[in-house]
Image: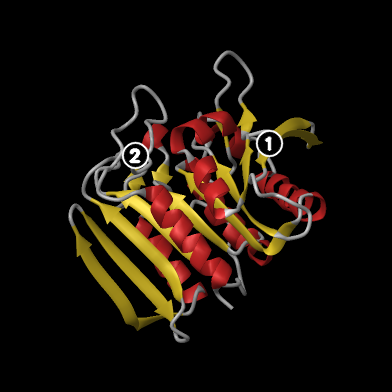
């Protein structure tokens, strides 16, 4: 891709970096939807791009793709993390303002790269998924929808008058690092259960409990909740295969869990985001 732009900004004294990849049909006569992809704890924008293969999908679907980097820990092991609330690592301990960082990226996309301000999406893996939930809480007016893989919501603030944000959530029943039922996971962090998080969002997204669908597939169950207008607001896939990994992606790390094969995360993500792009 020649349409690859590496960017750096300084925020709170940290050097922050992100990569923008424009689709091959990019021209300045139209506006483009954009996806900001947030790596997991210990990963990077580059690793995220390599492991989850979102760029080709974005190109085929005419999206701008953005891969930001979390803040590096000082010292020998320079693990990158996001401050999603009570997790994770250095970013959370030092109260790094990642919401402002992503918000500035969105401003850059809209101002300089013909991004449609009403079609900005966030997708995140693990700690990146936790960050996606935090962004949906703090800047819901800037985000059209989020997709979370193997994450949960750990924001430690109380929010009032939240704006609905459609959510796709993908998780494995075998995930020991961010357990779907909540409790202690990776590095002894405590995580709320996915059900408790989705309960909060069912209220925010004005889901109608009578308007819910459950579909049983081979090695996965899909739960869908709609609002009273019949719009899909929460789409939840729980797999019985895989683990703390990106379904049909590559392992994020050598010692990582085997990805689920029962569903294809990228298929589901682009179908979900495309539907939101077309929703009035």
- Provide the secondary structure element on which disc 1 rests: strand
Asked if residue 258 shows in the view, the reply is yes
- How would you rate the neighbour count of disc 1 (Cα within 10 Å): few for under 14, some for 14-19, many for 20 or more? many
Asked if residue 156 shows in the view, the reply is no
The spot of residue 152 in percent (x, y) is 43, 51
Q: Is residue 65 above or below residue 272?
A: above
Which residue is pictured at 78% across the width and 54% down the height?
Answer: 28
The spot of residue 31 in percent (x, y) is 72, 60
Disc 1 + disc 2, Cβ < 8 Å: no
Q: Which residue is mark 2?
A: 244
- How would you rate the neighbour count of disc 2 (Cα within 10 Å): few for under 14, some for 14-19, many for 20 or more? many
Asked which quadrant contains residue 70, the reply is top right
Decide which of tag 1 and tag 2 comes sooner along the chain. Answer: 1
Quadrant (top left/top right/bottom left/bottom right) for the N terminus:
top right
Asked which quadrant contains residue 71, the reply is top right
* In-front residue for pair 233/271: 271
Quadrant (top left/top right/bottom left/bottom right) for the C terminus:
bottom right
């Amino acid at each position: 891709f020649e349409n690859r732009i590496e960017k750096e900004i300084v925020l709170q004294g940290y050097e922050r970096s992100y990569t923008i990849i424009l689709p091959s049909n990019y021209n300045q006569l139209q506006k483009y939807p954009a996806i900001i992809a947030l790596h997991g704890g210990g990963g990077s924008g580059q690793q995220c791009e390599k492991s989850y293969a979102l760029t080709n999908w974005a190109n085929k679907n005419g999206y701008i793709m953005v891969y930001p980097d979390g803040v590096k820990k000082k010292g020998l092991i320079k693990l990158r993390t996001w401050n999603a609330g009570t997790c994770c690592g250095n970013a959370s301990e030092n109260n790094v303002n990642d919401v402002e960082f992503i918000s500035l990226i969105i401003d850059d996309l809209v101002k300089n790269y013909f991004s449609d301000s009403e079609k900005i999406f966030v997708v995140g893996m693990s700690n990146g998924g936790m960050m996606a939930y935090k962004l949906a809480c703090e800047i819901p007016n800037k985000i059209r929808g989020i997709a979370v893989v193997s994450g949960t919501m750990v924001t430690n603030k109380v929010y009032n008058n939240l704006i609905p944000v459609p959510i796709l959530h993908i998780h494995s029943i075998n995930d020991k690092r961010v357990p779907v039922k909540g409790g202690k996971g990776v590095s002894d962090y405590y995580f709320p259960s996915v059900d408790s998080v989705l309960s909060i969002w069912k209220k925010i997204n004005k889901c109608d409990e009578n308007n819910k669908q459950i579909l049983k597939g081979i090695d996965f169950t899909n739960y869908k909740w709609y609002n009273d207008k019949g719009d899909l607001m929460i789409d939840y896939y729980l797999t019985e295969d895989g683990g703390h990994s990106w379904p049909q992606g590559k392992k994020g790390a050598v010692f990582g869990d085997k990805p689920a094969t029962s569903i294809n995360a990228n298929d589901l993500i682009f179908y979900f985001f495309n539907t939101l792009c077309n929703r009035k």
